[in-house]
Image (cartoon, rainbow, N blue to C red):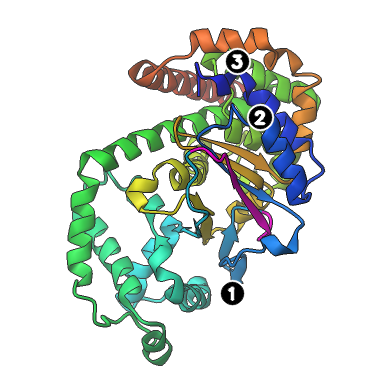
Amino acid sequence: MSGSAFSHERQEILEDFVNLETPCDAETISEAWSRHYSALSGSRGIFVVTDSIQEKKLPGNHDFGESGFLRCWMSSSRLLLIQNREGASEFRYSSPIFCDTNFASFCKAFQAGRSLGAHQAGFEAAVKFLLPLSKGVNIFPYLIENAENSNREKVHATIQAFAAFKLTLSESFSEMNRFTHDGSPYSAEQIADGCLKAMAGPDFKVLHTWMKRYYLWARIVLLKSTLVVFQRKEVTLERRYYALIKFLHEEMARLPQFETFVGYRFFTLSTREPFFQGVQQNARALDRTLSAMAWDLASLARTVRNASHSLGYWSLPAFPIPHFLIFDEPFVRLTDGLRLNGLIYDQVRQRTEQIPSVIALSVSKLLNSSCKEFIEPKARDDRSRRTLRDEQLEENLIAVEAELARELDSHKQSAS
């Protein structure tokens, strides 16, 4: 939204919604939307409200055994769908379910008859729950992470197994406890062939390029946050967060919303949060751990945004409400603290604004106190002037990520 009317009002809009005592009633949300009516032209909003009449029928939140977790990205199923009158779309919503790479791999192992060990019961319970909803289930994170995998045979086999899951009827699975072909005009192999062909096409390559950028953003924030924690052990939460925001302002000319929320949660919980437990100065595989964490965060951030401004690619209604199936308990515990009270989809400018339910107010307080200098008009205009585009941005992301990785490696060596 850089250079648009929205970019100048973005902070005020987010602050307005964040500072509401949420969840609140639909009228209060509508009033807040109306205060920014012109700036929200072309946008569509989904907000958690207290009104029972706004209850939506969603897959919701479910645990499958002790290893599988389905989570709606919104903090409640009472949701107000809102947009401007001009150019309004029909108020239809969907519940796309993005499965993690573990589920894709489990499908392949299950179809081959291999045991899933501790994940067996959770996987089978998840399959039984998802089959009636299978039309809206996808393995987009797996496709993105394996777009450049040279072992195309393995990728094809995994996609084929997932396709077999989608072709199976609930009744058949309940009776036979296996994937079956239930009358579709296409075979699982044909679907996998078509999927690999699409992955080689220009549209998917654009999505993959964007995903790599989300990965680099997540990795940069994780690397810098780790260095701040290692180098400033006695510093307060406020000073640590200030150091992160100052770095992003000065070096990146951007304050990526989702990633800075993650940084705040890292500084708040540190190794008490299972997702961050591997971030230790004496960890042998620290760089690999941070890389895996960055892919997880990138998948989460990208799929939320992909559900909004890639509607044509996924053929989704105008108000998608993302769900995630995750077979990773530490990661699910992290995401539980990042679920949303609001989403603003801007279809014109290809951007999504997120209003987390748990930590947004705390972050807002920091941004309006110790970090206030970075959200004032002068700082925002400064970032706007320095913001890089496309190839230059990617080159900068790669260079900064490499420099931070070297700095972290040097710090570890000097500390040992």
Mark on residue 249? 3
In the rendered view, does 276 fall on the left or right side of 168? right
Q: Mark 2 points at which residue?
A: 36
In percent of width and height, residue 396 lies at 42, 17
- Amino acid type at mark 3: His
Q: Residues within 10 Å of mark 2 (few under 14, many from 20)?
A: some
Asked whether 346 falls inside the magenta stretch, the response is: no
Which is nearer the N-term, disc 1 or disc 2?
2
- Amino acid type at mark 1: Gly
Mark on residue 65? 1
The answer to whether one can see residue 232 in this image is no
Q: Nearer the viewer, mark 3 or mark 2?
A: 2
Secondary structure beneath label 3? helix
The answer to whether one can see residue 61 in this image is yes
For the residue pair 273 and 61, the one nearer the viewer reads as 61
For the residue pair 56 and 314, the one nearer the viewer reads as 56
Secondary structure beneath label 2? loop
Choose top left, top right, bottom left or bottom right for residue 344: top right
Which is nearer the N-term, disc 3 or disc 2?
2
Q: Residue at x 68, y 15 (%)?
A: 374
Q: Residues within 10 Å of mark 1 (few under 14, many from 20)?
A: some
Q: Which of marks 1 and 2 is in front?
A: 2
Q: Which residue is drawn at 58% across and 22% down?
A: 411
- Amino acid type at mark 2: His
In percent of width and height, residue 128 lies at 47, 79
* Quarter of the image where the C terminus is located: top right
Q: Which residue is drawn at 77% across and 44% down?
A: 28
Secondary structure beneath label 1? loop
